[in-house]
Amino acid sequence: MSAVGAGVGLAALARPLTLPNGFVIPNRLAKAALSEGLGRRDFSPGSRIDNLYRRWADCGVGLSITGNVMVDRTQTGEPGNVVVEDRRHLDDLARWAATAKAGGSKVWVQINHPGRQIPRTVGTHPVAPSAIPLPGAARLFATPRALSGGEVRDIIGRFANTARIVVEAGFDGIQIHGAHGYLVSQFLSPLSNQRSDEWGGTPERRHRFVLEVVRAIRAEVGADVPVGIKLNSADFQKGGFAEAESLEVVHKLAEEGIDLLEVSGGTYTSSAMLGVDESLKESTRRREAYFMAYAERVRAALPELPLMLTGGFRTAGGMVEALESGSIDLVGLGRPLCVQPDFPAELLAGRAQESVVVPHRSGIRLLDNLTELTYYSVQMWRMGNGREPAPDRHPAINVGQYLLHNGLEGLRPRRA
């Protein structure tokens, strides 16, 4: 058994992490947000979400982040989204929180608004910073309507309201979804935000929306409740949100007192976060952590800002190396928990060295993205139905099940 397997390096994974506000995460492994697609038709969490998080409750992570909970029931990103606009489903939310926390993990809710990323089969009236459609997807996504200034303010208030309610329900913290092409990242990108008012036109004004969301949430939940954000290192699109500007935004978020930054990257048209995009070099994949170079730049500039890195971690050695280098503070795991729900606990006990997860690539980008996302969505649905994952099934079977489950909506892959 290697040194890591024997426990010499495992202390790095098991060590608690104390955030600047005093909040303690029991260890250095985190379940990254994954869009479960298991909410009821009335947008409440139900028994299937409870089943999934009951299966994950003892998985060994110190922090579990839910899939994207939406702030507006008229603007959802996919079938099965949970929406929290008011207290009508407070009991269901409280049960979800208690179930997810039963094994000792801290549990945060990821809060989101899809902006223009709403499939036509889910909604035909999307809104966005500007009336610019999703590139190359006109048949699947309607052209959004540009938000008025008053509507922008309303959405900021919705983020804060949702945060207050889920904390009341018993969740431990909040993560703002600022990545993967959703509304926050649409405001940040010069490709999707071509406004000329206070919310766009210059980098400073494009950054304003996310900063106002952070301030509004903090005003509702207070300093003791951790508020984190998932942010793109870049969107990997020419002329888009680039790494240099992302670093500028991180500096501003640090000034606002953000408690945890999760680093990710890409959009649905450039899915670098899945490890199947051609923009990722093979050397990057071998290193496991897709966005480590960016995380190292953030750490050098802001050494006190807690960092979580998600995307590509597969081996105990890779995780320990990343933590012991001092570049990051938390290892984010997504897809491994869909096919190996006990993987973190096995890592911590020294009984596992490597995840079985490997990207499914054919060389056709759209097909690769669809195959990757549907494969893991179906595994979550199995657990939601009280069954174990089936990692050895052919990916095409999962795509077929996904399309049957959602109809044409299945053409829109899910990722939180």
Image (spheres, rainbow, N blue to C red):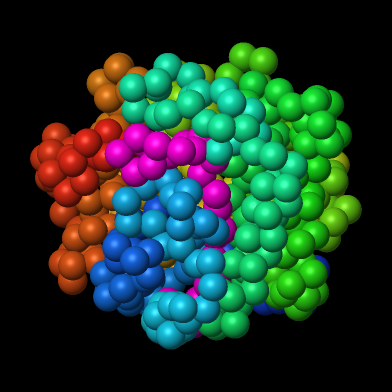
Viewer-closest of 94 and 128: 128
Judge whether 197 appears above or below 350 on screen. above
Viewer-closest of 260 and 48: 48
Q: Quadrant of the N terminus?
A: bottom left
Describe residue 371's horizontal placement relative to residue 221 as left or right: left
Report the number of discs.
Answer: 0
Judge whether 133 appears above or below 6 on screen. above
Chief secondary structure of the magenta portion = loop
Residue drawn at x 24%, y 54% is 379
Judge whether 206 appears above or below 334 on screen. above
Residue 66: percent from the left, percent from the top? Answer: 47, 63
Residue 33: percent from the left, percent from the top? Answer: 47, 56
Q: Which residues are magenta?
A: 100-126
Residue 248: percent from the left, percent from the top? Answer: 82, 36
Residue 290 seen in the figure: no
Describe residue 192's horizontal placement relative to residue 117 as left or right: right
Judge whether 209 appears above or below 286 on screen. below
Residue 211: percent from the left, percent from the top? Answer: 79, 49
Residue 368 seen in the figure: yes
Q: Is residue 122 magenta?
A: yes
